[in-house]
Image (spheres, rainbow, N blue to C red):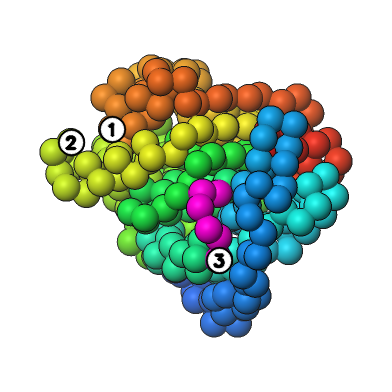
């Protein structure tokens, strides 16, 4: 029975997974070669304004550095920039350019973040003093990588919009996965995303957090566990530096919506996630080890009153930057 039924099924599954991995790699390589976007294609002008030149209701409004997400580019922030500058004339906004559009998905996160740091440093060099960071979607993970790795950052406030902050378990959603990989369920796709090829060539593989296969997640996923300090001794120099740099930020605002049609679970935007002990249920960030052990400073940030988590009704994933409702919700937090 084993030779006639089980073994052929195992071999068939192996062939399907192998073909899927090869297809992903070949597609990624093709898109990367055909559609790669150069870094810093939009030069940033020097900010000639002083901070006190732009005042809000509660005092000076700081310059803003913006970090785009998946399948996006600096132009993704055009509506937000227009709204910000209409409300605060003269306020400097710097949407940074790095791995734009298709290259934001067909390039691994471990390759993306160092380039993003360089683009961020270029923007920060044009600003005298502190600044605000606004990030959307995958850009929120890039933003945290920048904050943890850039020792000289002057981020006073970070506003994260619909970020998969504790990972993703559904890019771009179970229904889409069924069409792309009809033979694989969401609980099986880790076979693909947790390969070295996918880690190198598929951005969201770097933060695919499968609650059913946590051992494989810690062993194979390169980006998110690294910046969560999950695979490092707390006395490790890199872990200490990540945490110290993260805690330099004076205030973090996390915004997400139950109407999000991309992030799974949607409140990963608020650092909630599926509970590994009960993978069908979402548990609050305070129940997860990154908070309990304060691996990179999230608990400290929360306990000192520097963490705001704001759920907003009715905002789909791209609505944050494409609609008046999304943009107005952001303006309220500046």
Q: Position of residue 171 (x, y in %)?
A: 57, 46
Question: In terms of depth relative to the viewer, which is nearer, 79 or 277?
Answer: 79
Q: Secondary structure at mark 1?
A: loop
Callout 3: few (<14), some (14-19), or many (20+) C-alpha neighbours within 10 Å?
some
Q: Residue at x 18, y 36 (%)?
A: 234
User: Residue shown at 57%/79% (left/top)?
Assistant: 38
Residue at 57% over, 32% down: 254
Q: What is the CA distance from the residue labelled 2 to the residue labelled 1?
A: 7 Å
Q: Position of residue 105 (x, y in %)?
A: 55, 62
As helix, strand or loop, the secondary structure at mark 2 comes to: loop
Nearer the observer: mark 2 or 3; the answer is 3
Q: Separation of disc 2 and disc 3 at Cα? A: 35 Å
At mark 3, the secondary structure is loop
Q: Which mark is residue 3?
A: none
> Which residue, given by chain and number where applicable, does mark 2 sit on?
234
Image quadrant assignment for residue 110 = bottom left
Q: Residue 46's spot in the image, x, y percent?
A: 62, 70
**Magenta region, residue range:** 126-131
User: In whole angstroms, how far apart are the C-alphas of marks 1 and 3?
Assistant: 32 Å
On the question of residue 183 being in view, the answer is no
Quarter holding residue 115: bottom left
Q: Say if 267 sits above or below 94 in the image.
A: above
Magenta-span inclusion, residue 316: no
Q: Are marks 2 and 1 in contact (CB under 8 Å)?
A: yes
Mark 1 or mark 3: which comes first in sequence? 3
Judging by the rendered image, the residue that carries numbered circle 1 is 295
């Amino acid at each position: 029975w084993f030779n006639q039924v089980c073994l052929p099924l195992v071999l068939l599954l192996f062939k399907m997974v192998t073909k899927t991995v090869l297809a992903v790699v070949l597609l990624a390589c093709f898109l990367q070669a055909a559609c790669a976007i150069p870094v810093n294609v939009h030069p940033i002008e020097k900010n000639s304004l002083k901070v006190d030149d732009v005042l809000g209701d509660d005092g000076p409004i700081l310059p803003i550095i913006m970090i785009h997400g998946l399948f996006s580019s600096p132009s993704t922030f055009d509506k937000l920039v227009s709204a910000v500058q209409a409300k605060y004339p003269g306020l400097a906004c710097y949407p940074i350019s790095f791995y734009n559009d298709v290259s934001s998905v067909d390039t691994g996160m471990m390759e993306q973040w160092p380039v993003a740091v360089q683009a961020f440093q270029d923007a920060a060099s044009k600003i005298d003093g502190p600044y605000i960071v606004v990030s959307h979607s995958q850009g929120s993970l890039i933003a945290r990588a920048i904050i943890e790795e850039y020792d000289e950052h002057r981020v006073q406030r970070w506003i994260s919009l619909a970020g998969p902050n504790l990972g993703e378990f559904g890019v771009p959603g179970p229904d889409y996965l069924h069409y792309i990989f009809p033979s694989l369920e969401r609980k099986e796709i880790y076979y693909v995303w947790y390969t070295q090829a996918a880690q190198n060539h598929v951005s969201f593989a770097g933060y695919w957090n499968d609650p059913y296969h946590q051992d494989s997640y810690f062993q194979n996923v390169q980006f998110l566990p690294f910046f969560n300090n999950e695979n490092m001794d707390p006395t490790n120099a890199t872990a200490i530096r990540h945490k110290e740099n993260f805690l330099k930020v004076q205030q973090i605002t996390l915004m997400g919506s139950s109407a999000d049609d991309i992030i799974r679970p949607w409140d990963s935007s608020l650092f909630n996630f599926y509970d590994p002990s009960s993978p069908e249920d979402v548990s609050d960030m305070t129940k997860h080890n990154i908070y309990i052990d304060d691996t990179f400073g999230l608990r400290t940030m929360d306990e000192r009153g520097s963490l705001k988590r704001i759920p907003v009704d009715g905002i789909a994933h791209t609505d944050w930057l494409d609609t008046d409702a999304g943009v107005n919700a952001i303006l309220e937090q500046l």
